[in-house]
Image: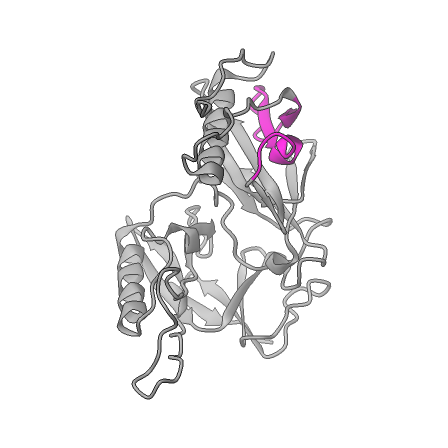
């Protein structure tokens, strides 16, 4: 007889806010549905174990925040881990007593470093690709709580990488992109489809996300890293002469805030990283295939470094 897939009722673990526990239970349900896709005989959705939850101090408001480590639940539910570690979520307390997600992405480990006066540093040990390396390379990305943005944002820190590749700190809970950025998404989709390919994720959110404040106005600016792919249901795309069609290369882009909108200040096929060591993040653009060396800030082969110029309201090439 097929077993029901509804989540079993269970009390909230002592001390864990009901809102946080409910959100984790919902994420369990999503992962369970993806694993079994409604198959007969699927087991009942397991309950999140208490060991997943840990009190942390992220925003120094006197109320506990919560780090949720899905690696500690990997024996009871699958689909939430990969080569870059397991899903980690940080729920941060708000002034009204509720909680918001400040981080929701794959990480190998999350460490919180307390500070005397500044916001605590949150060190995320992540897949090496985020630091310009491979999966086996160390990549510790330092972050701090940014109240205006309502999320953890990468910052310079002695124990962290100096140059990092863009990543979505809320990859498991993406936010909707502004209209001008969605317009680029639509143009990219048209390019893919004209060549016989598709643009993954109809909403474009997995490759489109706010990241850092590039222009110094306290608003996070957006990264767009689109790519075409072959549809899973289609045969390989061929040209009229029977050769395999070339997949279009789409431009990456950086959009910065301007008033109530965002404008494109850089685009190109080259890879993009950010040097965090200056007073404001510097954009490090490197030719495809070059690898940044995080032991020396901004050191890449065949790179161009840009910094935002407040006088001209443009990005300018930083003198080497």
Residue 320 is inside the magenta segment: no
Q: Residue furthest bottom?
A: 241
Query: From where the camera sits, is residue 147 visible?
Result: no
Is there any visible trace of residue 135 in the rendered image?
yes
Nearer the observer, 211 or 297: 211
| Above or below, comparing residue 23 to residue 119 in the picture | above
Q: Residue at the spot x=48%, y=30% of the render?
A: 42
Task: Using the image as rendered, state which of residue 70 and residue 62 is in the foreground.
Answer: 70
Quarter of the image with the C terminus is: bottom right
What residue appears at the point 58 percent right and 26 percent down from the top-left corner?
66
Total numbered circles: 0
Between 123 and 312, the one nearer to me in the picture = 123
Residue lying farthest front? Answer: 1
Lateral position of residue 145 relative to residue 194, left or right? right
Q: Can you say whether 105 is above or below 223 in the image?
A: above
The picture places residue 310, in percent across and down from the top left corner, at 42, 60
Give the magenta part as a residue range. Answer: 51-78
Q: Is residue 58 magenta?
A: yes
Q: Residue 137's spot in the image, x, y percent? A: 72, 59
Q: Determine the image quadrant of residue 230.
A: bottom left
Residue 180: x and y in percent read 27, 57
x and y percent of residue 183 in the render?
26, 59
Q: Looking at the rendering, which quadrant does residue 253 occupy?
A: bottom left
User: At x 32% / y 53%, what residue is drawn?
Assistant: 202
Question: Residue 304 or 130: which is nearer the viewer?
Answer: 130
Give the colouring mode of the picture: one colour
User: From what the image shows, is residue 254 above or below residue 219?
Assistant: below
């Amino acid at each position: 007889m097929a077993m029901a897939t509804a989540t079993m009722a269970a009390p909230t673990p002592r001390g864990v806010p009901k809102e946080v526990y409910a959100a984790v239970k919902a994420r369990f349900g999503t992962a369970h549905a993806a694993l079994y896709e409604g198959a007969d005989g699927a087991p009942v959705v397991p309950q999140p174990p208490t060991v997943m939850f840990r009190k942390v101090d992220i925003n120094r408001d006197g109320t506990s925040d919560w780090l949720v480590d899905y690696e500690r639940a990997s024996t009871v539910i699958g689909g939430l881990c990969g080569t870059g570690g397991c899903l980690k979520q940080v729920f941060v307390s708000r002034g009204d007593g509720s909680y918001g997600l400040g981080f929701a992405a794959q990480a190998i480990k999350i460490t919180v470093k307390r500070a005397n006066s500044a916001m605590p540093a949150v060190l995320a040990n992540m897949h090496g690709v985020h630091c310009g390396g491979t999966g086996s390379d160390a990549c510790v990305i330092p972050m701090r709580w940014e109240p205006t943005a309502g999320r953890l944002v990468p910052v310079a820190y002695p124990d962290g990488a100096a140059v990092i590749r863009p990543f979505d700190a809320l990859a498991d809970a993406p936010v909707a992109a502004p209209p001008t950025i969605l317009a680029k998404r639509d143009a990219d989709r048209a390019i893919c489809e004209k060549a016989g390919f598709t643009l993954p994720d109809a909403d474009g959110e997995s490759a489109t996300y706010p990241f850092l404040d590039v222009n110094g106005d306290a608003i996070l600016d957006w990264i767009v890293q689109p790519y075409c792919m072959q549809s899973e249901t289609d045969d390989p795309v061929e040209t009229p002469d029977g050769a395999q069609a070339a997949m279009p290369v789409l431009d990456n882009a950086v959009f910065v805030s301007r008033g109530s909108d965002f404008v494109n200040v850089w685009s190109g096929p080259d890879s993009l990283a950010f040097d965090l060591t200056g007073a404001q993040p510097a954009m490090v653009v490197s030719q495809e295939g070059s690898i940044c060396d995080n032991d020396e800030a901004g050191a890449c082969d065949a790179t161009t470094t840009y910094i935002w110029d407040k006088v001209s309201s443009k990005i300018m090439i930083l003198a080497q």
